[in-house]
Amino acid sequence: MAMERTAIIAGNWKMNLGPKEASSFALEILPSLGQITAKDPHIMSILCPPAISLPAIKEVLDSLPVRHVELGAQNMYFEEKGAFTGEIAPGMVKELCNFVILGHSERRTIFGETNELVNKKVLAAFKHALVPIVCVGENREQYENGETQNLIKDQIRQSLANLTTEQAAQVVIAYEPIWAIGSGQASDAHAAGNVIHYIRHQYHEMYGQKAADAVRILYGGSVNAENIAEFIAHPDIDGALVGGVSIKHDFIELLRNASKFNA
Ligand code: PGA
């Protein structure tokens, strides 16, 4: 990735590790993760556990001598409060963390989230000084039909509409081809880099040079401790959103290699 942008290695735990398990896993991995990021100012790590486990991990983080790992939520609603059973408000997320994943493909496909809804959530995140990690990506059929660019263009233009240029510069985007998620078959870095280059081009048209230079664009989909090297070394790719490996001890090795091969 380009050195002027701090790389991000984010772990999306999905619906794994409740408070008890999260707490013991955090105790095992956080000191090592913190050591790596403490030594390398060009990389940051963000853990995104289930919302119910956030306090347990925050407690572990707060007990460590130096806090070098960030926390993020996996989702939230855009309303401030009220009769939205089962939802979490942006202000509640902000009490515990600074980042929030929005529009993950599992939210889009299983829970029917649209670009319009994701956009409302993005705007609500900024209202509460949360940095959104906005996910986009095509499914296998769209990929095979050569529809990737058109789909990504709509997702970016609609999910990230109506931002100020300052907000646009802070956004983190995760390009995650759905066919690569959890499949063990990552995209190759060159192909992912091309899509990410295209995303940056769209962003440039929407928000200008400064925001396009600043926006961090990650790759996600079967990233592991070995293949992270080629993704992070690619000049257009600013890090990774990691699912499966982020709930394993291998995540430490993955972050170590990301720091080592960050070009
Ligand atoms: P994976 O998931 O690393 O298990 O493929 C990535 C994601 O869904 O964010």
Image (cartoon, rainbow, N blue to C red):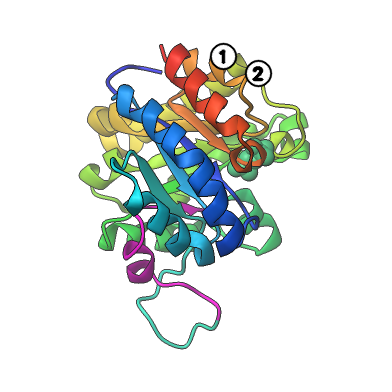
Q: Position of residue 142 (x, y in %)?
A: 72, 38
Quadrant into which the C terminus falls: top left
Q: How many marks do you count on the picture?
A: 2
Q: Compare residues 186 and 194 and report the one nearer the observer.
A: 186
Is the CB of the residue bearing disc 1 within 8 angstroms of ligand 1?
no
Q: Is residue 189 above or below residue 6?
A: above
Q: Position of residue 235 (x, y in %)?
A: 43, 14
Q: Is residue 248 above or below residue 230?
A: below
- Identify the residue at image location x=23%, y=49%: 164
Query: Was residue 102 drawn as part of the magenta stretch in this picture?
Result: yes
Q: Looking at the image, in which quadrant does ligand 1 appear?
A: top right
Q: Compare residues 111 and 37 and report the one nearer the observer.
A: 37
Residue that badge 1 annotates: 230
Identified by mark 2, the residue type is Asp
Q: Compare residues 254 and 82 and report the one nearer the observer.
A: 254
State the separation of the CA atoms marked 2 and 1: 8 Å
Q: Position of residue 118 (x, y in %)?
A: 48, 58
Which label is found at residue 211?
none
Q: Quadrant of residue 138?
A: top right
Identified by mark 1, the residue type is Glu
Q: Is residue 97 left or right of 116 when viewed as pictured?
A: left
Q: Which residue range is magenta in the image?
A: 86-103
Q: Compare residues 229 and 216 and report the one nearer the observer.
A: 229
**Mark positioned earlier in the residue sequence (2 or 1):** 2
Q: Position of residue 162 (x, y in %)?
A: 32, 53
Q: Quadrant of residue 127?
A: bottom left
Which label is found at residue 188?
2
Q: Nearer the viewer, mark 2 or mark 1?
A: 1
Is residue 243 in sight in this rendering? yes
